[in-house]
Amino acid sequence: MRTWLVRGSAMAVVHAAAETLRADFGVAHPTSRTLFEALTLGVLVGVAAVWGAVDRWRGLEDAGRTWLIASLVAGWGSAVLGVVGKSVFVDQTGVADLGAALTGGAAFTALLVLIPAAIGLGAGNWIRSTRASADTDEEEDAGAQRGGPTRSRPRS
């Protein structure tokens, strides 16, 4: 299965579930939903960022394009699933709300997946490069202890 489809579908389900929970919490506790919404947003950003970092750390081929397409799939998928979830579990949300969800809601969700994933890809690249330089330093130290040739590094 294509990697963008797995990531996009999983993120669509996560975002739709979060939207449904947020709407249900807003109906049950209308005066204290600000903290819940902030925590929900933090979890959604964290999921995309960590998954992006793991993808880059593992060396996924073409990870940027994968996350771009996955964010589009997640946007449209979460729009449809969010409307269905709210109509089943929260209130009488209907087809009339689908238009707004497929335009503004899908665009917001796509950005909410793409930007943290891009930050995660950068972080994963940094983790990968620091790990590679640490492995190189250990190899050089082991070669020096055995009396073998060592590579000299230019001083910075």
Image (cartoon, rainbow, N blue to C red):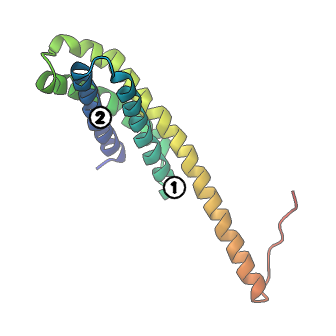
What is the x, y in percent for residue 79?
A: 27, 24
The amino acid pointed to by label 1 is Trp
What is the x, y in percent for residue 141?
A: 74, 78
Badge 1 vs badge 2, beta-carbon distance below 8 Å: no
Q: Residue at x 58, y 57 (%)?
A: 128
Image disc number at residue 12: 2
The amino acid pointed to by label 2 is Ala
Q: Is residue 81 visible?
A: yes
Image disc number at residue 65: none
Q: Residue at x 84, y 71 (%)?
A: 152
What is the x, y in percent for residue 21?
A: 25, 30
In the figure, 9 relative to 28: above or below?
A: below
Q: CA distance from mark 1 to mark 2?
A: 23 Å
Left or right side of 54 for 138: right
Q: Secondary structure at mark 2?
A: helix
Q: Secondary structure at mark 1?
A: helix
Q: Residue furthest bottom?
A: 146
Quarter of the rendering containing residue 94: top left
What is the x, y in percent for residue 95?
A: 15, 14
In the figure, 145 relative to 10: above or below?
A: below
Figure quadrant of the C terminus: bottom right
Q: Residue at x 39, y 38 (%)?
A: 43
Q: Residue at x 28, y 26 (%)?
A: 22
Q: First in sequence, mark 1 or 2: give its number.
A: 2
Q: Is residue 77 visible?
A: no
Residue ID for mark 1: 57
Q: Residues within 10 Å of mark 1 (few under 14, many from 20)?
A: many
Quarter of the rendering containing residue 48: top left
In the figure, 90 relative to 11: above or below?
A: above
